[in-house]
Image (cartoon, rainbow, N blue to C red):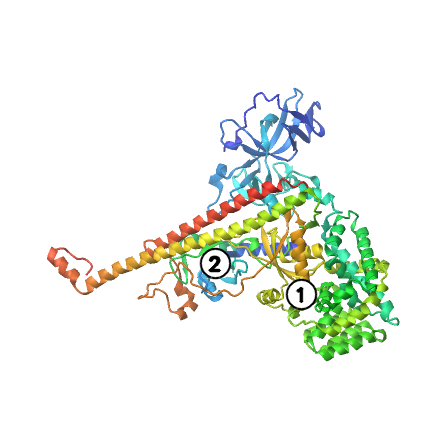
Amino acid sequence: MPAMSQPEDATDLENYEFKWGKKRGLGGKRKEVRFYESFTFDGVDYSLYDCVYLYKEGEPEPYIGKLMKIWEQPDHKKKIKVLWFFRPIEILNYIGDNMTVHDKEIFLASGEGVGLANVNPLEVIAGKCNVVCTSEDPRNPQPSNEELEMADYIFHRTFDVGNYKISDKMDDKVGGIEVRFIFNKKEVQGSSNIPKHVAEQIKENGRVVVGDEASKSFSKQNSVPIENVNAVDTPTCSVAKGDAQLELPWANEEPLSGEKAAPGVVTEAKESAPSGVRQEKVLKRFKANYEKDGKGSDIPSQVEDKERPISAKGVGELDRPSKKAKLDTDTKLEEQQAYLSSLLATGKERSGNISQKLAVDSEDDGVKVSLKADSASEDKSKSKLVKESVVQDKGHSKKVKPDGKTTKISNGVLPKAASAHPPEKDIKTDARLLEVTRRPNADRSKWFKALPWEERMKTAHEQETLVLLQNLDPAYTSAEIEDIIWHGFRENCTAKVVQHTSASSPHSGQAFVIFKTREAAEMAIRKLDEGCLMLPNGRPLIGSRVNPVLQRKRSAFVGHLFIDKVRLQMPREDMKRAISTSHCSQPNTIEYEMAMEWRLLQTRVDIWWKELYKQQVVELRKVENNLKFK
Amino acid sequence: MGTPAHKEYAEFQEKVKRTVYVDNLSPQITEAVLKTALEQFGNVRDVQFIPNYTEANEIPQCALVEMETAKLAKAIIMEMTDYPFMLGGMPRPVRARAAEVEMFSDRPIKPGRKIQIRWMDPKDPDFEVAKKLKHLTKKHVAEASLLLKHQLEEEKKLAYSQAENLEVNYKKYEMIDNLIIDGTFRRLSSKYNLELQDS
């Protein structure tokens, strides 16, 4: 094994810049050896457990090793002990036939024996090597895709130098190093593996909208209405939560999504105060807005917009009332009338009853009724409900039609509600509602079977609520994208990632997002276009309207040949018994030869794609490097 | 770490390993056809076509086929790589590869990932860079689309030339057949005094 041989003493390297870093302690028999944790060599900072290239003359490729120990001897010779990595080519004989080796993969030496580690003069270090551990061991902080992309090498297996076995299990100690130093470093340690900007971003937390905080803020907003409408509308009732929430959520929402939206959000983002404080500010702004509303400036005009009452409620975080509204619209106009009266009668009724009554009134859907009962019974189930209502909204989005009457009502009620808005109360309530936005989507499907995505997308496209997001991290899931949209725009949506294929860009993901309203979709597109929503790792989000390809004519598939007279193809019925139409082609036939031509083309095309994406990454990095704050 | 999220993700990763990504599928291939075809190798758990909503061009179908075990999935990929596999027609072979996480639409969130977003101030010096990045991304999408178009053209070309070849070959064989059938072949061989082994 070539790696065993110790790299030769480097010659005169005195003129290189060198500085010791943090001391670790003394060692040796007479305490004359100084151990260090870090040093600077030739302008590069090294610390213990970094991976480095070690250069040996005459070898085409440098060795790769991990720094196990760094020390200075009494004679001022600087030494390092290095745990070796093996390149696959070095241990080729021990790699099994059916073992797939990633083209950047290397193997860590383990066990005991020659070739595990060596002591070398420090000067043989040729540079830092970014080795990322991809071990699925739960102790290993999993690398992100970006990190993988940036890695010079990856490893997840060890090669035992004693018994020549490759293993993907990590013991507690490998080569005498504790395993936690073998795995990727945690972010806090600010290691070289992790892009700096991540750390920077963490520091700038105030500026960045962090998921949890924002979700808190949402719950706060959401709970605002509870008190104040009570106060105004239903003085005798103490539990009229369901109703109370009806108007405010969207009223709440307006300052953000309305015309003022863009500056509003920007300022919010700029505020570097911790979220709680920020939240208060936001609330104050809301309050201000409400006061304006009282004078009839902003909201009434929006109320005139027919779709608003329903959709905006939906947007307002889909609390129970929104569902009620939906129920009503689902049923008939008379029902709406009933809804009106029930709304007015809130004072006499307990909220739970109302929602139940409403649900029964509608008699629309068994599931819904049960849902209602659920909602009335327990407060905790609220979070679940929110989720469910999301589904419901989607399910009924088609049916929801603007309705003049509801508009009027909310129009009438709103100013009252707004005027009595006590901002302090919400802060109290929020603690209880904290959990609401955690959205384990799995719960949804238990209750409702959502319409097929394709259909929803079609409807959304017709209603112009469909937006295509680009430049996402391909690793994001649909749920994460929904969260991003929520935090970025205070809008609810349904998202679905565009599934990758072999020709998809490995560094850029796309997703379809269905917003609740056309206005919301337009707002999002405009804001993404004019402003800039930065995702981690220097990805500005792009949003655009799309025309999804839903019904495609099935034109002929190229590459399947038929001879007119003979009809090589099986009759249609046989297609179902696919065995007769699927087979592995045998060499020595025309078919095989032609298949090989296809293979050739397929491989060539693969290379094109790979090259294209490689080139694109290079271009991206070039521009990204100009970013100061990533 | 035994949290449910970790467990769910681990299960999902297992599923990815069990899954074969198949492409170059004719649009006539249905779920049932694909399932039966791959059941020759072993038990198929699930077949899912990857829908194509973004690409206006006609592209061959691709699908994710979940097999019973990861080993089986691997074996299928090997088999289909070693031998061109015909499904629903020939000679364009179906291609199989290991599935990747991003190919699944219903994947769980990777535990421990934090996403941080921020709105950029237009005065921020990075704003212009971000603008450029956006532009670049759009350009890249367009490039990909162009390459796809090129790929489709190449495929068409190959199919066309193969069709021509096949026809020529077919005509040749047909001619030989006819010669054998109408006896010309035998007459010629006796005239030139040549042994005929086949007829």
Residue A379 seen by the camera: no
Counting from the top left corner in percent of width and height, residue B48 is at 53, 62
Using the image, name the chain to which the residue with label 2 belongs: B
* Three-letter residue code for mark 2: Ile
Given residues A14 and B123, the one toward you in this image is: B123
Counting from the top left corner in percent of width and height, residue B52 is at 53, 60
Q: Is residue B28 left or right of residue A511?
A: left
**C-alpha span from label 1 to label 2:** 33 Å
Figure quadrant of residue A180: top right
| Residue at image mark 2 | B59
User: Within 10 Å of the Cα at label 1, are there few (<14), some (14-19), or many (20+) other Cα atoms?
Assistant: many
Using the image, name the chain to which the residue with label 1 belongs: A
Label disc, if present, on residue A134 of the rendered structure: none
Task: Indicate whether A479 appears above or below A188.
Answer: below
Counting from the top left corner in percent of width and height, residue A101 is at 51, 44
For label 2, the SS is loop
| Residue at image mark 1 | A444
Task: Indicate whether A273 appears above or below B58.
Answer: above
* Three-letter residue code for mark 1: Arg
Counting from the top left corner in percent of width and height, residue B97 is at 48, 53
